[in-house]
Image (cartoon, grey):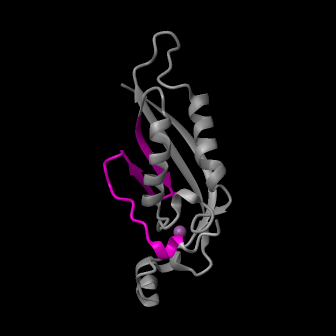
Amino acid sequence: MIYVTRRAHFSAAHRLYNPGFSDARNEAVFDKCNNYYGHGHNYQMEVTVKGIPDPETGYVIDLKFLARLIEEEILVKVDHKHLNFDVDFLSGVIPTAENIAIAFWRILEPKISSGILHSLKLYESENNFVEYFGEPVELARHDALAGEARR
Ligand code: NI
């Protein structure tokens, strides 16, 4: 297997809180990320597709295709947005790096037509990142959070 990776960046705001928690518990659990009006991150993501190079092209996946897919399906929807309010596919989701990575995976995975999506790495900062390999996990949604979405 050969592993092919496309890296992409976006900047976005979020606020971490659970509407079922008290203010004190939200502050204790989410600390600075609980700031009422949110705060920003410069996110970096790495999308890795694995496969065997096509004998005619030498490609596992055409990186131009993968770059365009990430741009059209993800980046235009999250870059310079507030993840709590602006992003339909994150509606009701606590926008941690974990949950964002799962949501991104679910969008990209069915659209990758050559090779197999292997991993999605999402850096929230230089030192903090998550990596997801597509294991079945629940993406918890909270109605009270979804109610806040602007659209
Ligand atoms: Ni944060």
Q: Picture coordinates of residue 82 (x, y %)?
A: 63, 66
Q: Picture coordinates of residue 56 (x, y %)?
A: 50, 9
Query: What residue appears at the point 47 percent right and 53 percent down from the top-left corner?
Result: 103
Query: What residue appears at the point 50 percent right and 36 percent down from the top-left corner?
Result: 111
Please tell me in which quadrant of the rendered image residue 2 appears. Answer: top left
Q: Picture coordinates of residue 14 (x, y %)?
A: 57, 68
**Depth order, front residue of 149/68:** 149
Q: Is residue 139 left or right of residue 147?
A: left
Image quarter (top left, top right, bottom left or bottom right) of the N terminus: top left
Indicate yes or no whether the magenta region holds residue 118: yes
Residue lying at the far left of the rendered structure: 136
**Chain part drawn in magenta:** 117-146
Residue lying at the far top of the rendered structure: 56
**Viewer can see residue 51:** yes
Q: Is residue 44 above or below residue 87?
A: above
Please tell me in which quadrant of the rendered image residue 118 appears. Answer: top left
Q: Is residue 82 above or below residue 68?
A: below
Please tell me in which quadrant of the rendered image residue 151 appears. Answer: bottom right
Query: What residue appears at the point 66 percent right and 49 percent down from the top-left corner?
Result: 76
**Depth order, front residue of 96/3:** 96
Query: What residue appears at the point 62 percent right and 56 percent down from the top-left corner?
Result: 78
Indicate yes or no whether the magenta region holds residue 81: no
Q: Is residue 133 above or below residue 42?
A: above
**Depth order, front residue of 14/142:** 142
Q: Is residue 99 left or right of residue 66?
A: left
